[in-house]
Image (cartoon, helix red, strand yellow):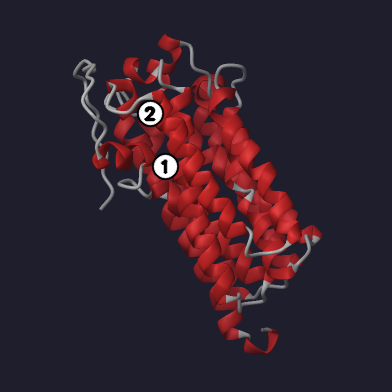
Amino acid sequence: MLRTNFYFALPMNNTRPSTLGSYLQLTRLNRPIGIYLVLWPTLWSLWLAAKGAPDIKNLIIFILGCILMRSAGCVINDYADRDFDGRVRRTRDRPLATGAVSSLEAISLFTGLSFLAFLLVLFTNSLTIKLSFAGLVLAVCYPFMKRYTHLPQIVLGAAFAWSIPMAFAAQAGELPQASWLVYTAVLLWTVCYDTFYAMVDREDDLRVGVKSTAVLFGDMDRVMTGALQVLTLVTLVMVGKRFELNWFYYLSLAVAAGLFGYQQYLIRNRERNACFAAFLNNNWVGMVIFIGIVGHYALSPELS
């Protein structure tokens, strides 16, 4: 079970050598929720692009790629926030904030993870390789956006969703117009669930000057996240129509709508742990929609 704890002790500066545990914490491999949130839409796209029968090679490439790039994204995020994390309750024990990992080590780790991900992309095709460069730019840009705009979650959504055109390019060799509907749905969804995540830190962010949609929305946060959830569902209905998906897919959307409603219930009092629980609950949304897509092709084998 995924859990989170908030620590209120002052950060400790130390100069001890970095350990494997520190690197694990820096990449968040010990907290894989971010991997799941990137992976589910990637799997949606591979199944849709392949009409239910994606290549095993592409599955392996994109599963490993999601793990590597999400880990790299966490490293560059902590590097960008190294001067802020020590003043935020939830993040003050992160390795860069405590000095367990140096800035140079973090940059080296980010570079290594990104390079490994790029090696995987080389086993696809030229279109996917070209798209990978834009994905890297988005991954690097996101952490620095919170200094300049209250909408960094949009950049995060663009980065998280970039695996979708890459998956279509790798599997189908092209980018059909309908693939951008999937991209739009995931971007909207990401902005919503990362707003829940930002609501956890909102008081600290206001104090240290970090910007987010949670800060921007203020007392309208429940209305705005609810609107984003509705727009996500509407866009996913449009995805279903464009890909001619059957009733099983729409049943999965109904379940996802129920999960969205539960998330709104969780954040009703804007309590930290409850907002984080709402964020975590989106893993089930991604999985349910994936089951709906797989179920469509399983029930309609003639389309494969």
Quarter of the image for residue 3 reads top left
Q: What amino acid is found at the position of numbered circle 2 in the picture?
A: Val
Q: Residue at x 78, y 60 (%)?
A: 175
Query: Does 81 appear above or below 223?
Result: above
* In contact (CB < 8 Å): disc 1 and disc 2: yes
Gap between marks 1 and 2, in whole Å?
A: 10 Å
Q: Earlier in the sequence, mark 1 or mark 2?
A: 2
Q: Residues within 10 Å of mark 2 (few under 14, many from 20)?
A: many
In the image, which disc is placed on residue 279?
Answer: 1
Q: How many marks?
A: 2
Q: Nearer the viewer, residue 194 or 103?
A: 103
Which mark, by number, is residue 91? none
- The structure residue drawn at horizontal position 66% and vertical position 49%, both measured from the top left corner, is 132
Under circle 1, the secondary element is: helix
Q: Quadrant of residue 13?
A: top left
Depth order, front residue of 139/23: 23
Query: What's under tag 1, amino acid-wise?
Result: Phe
Query: What secondary structure is marked by label 2?
Result: helix
Q: Position of residue 257 (x, y in %)?
A: 52, 54
- Residue 25, given in percent of the width and then of the height, sits at 31, 38
Position in image of residue 21 (x %, y %): 24, 41
Q: Is residue 255 visible?
A: no
Q: Is residue 295 above or below residue 150?
A: below
Image quadrant holding the C terminus, namely bottom right
Q: Quadrant of residue 170?
A: bottom right
Q: Position of residue 88 (x, y in %)?
A: 34, 19
Residue at image position (48%, 32%) is 76
Q: Against 68, is 219 above or below?
A: above
How crowded is the residue under tag 1: few (<14 C-alpha within 10 Å), some, or many (20+)?
many
Which residue is identified by label 2?
200
Query: Is residue 299 visible to the viewer in this orientation of the structure?
Result: yes
Q: Residue at x 21, y 25 (%)?
A: 16
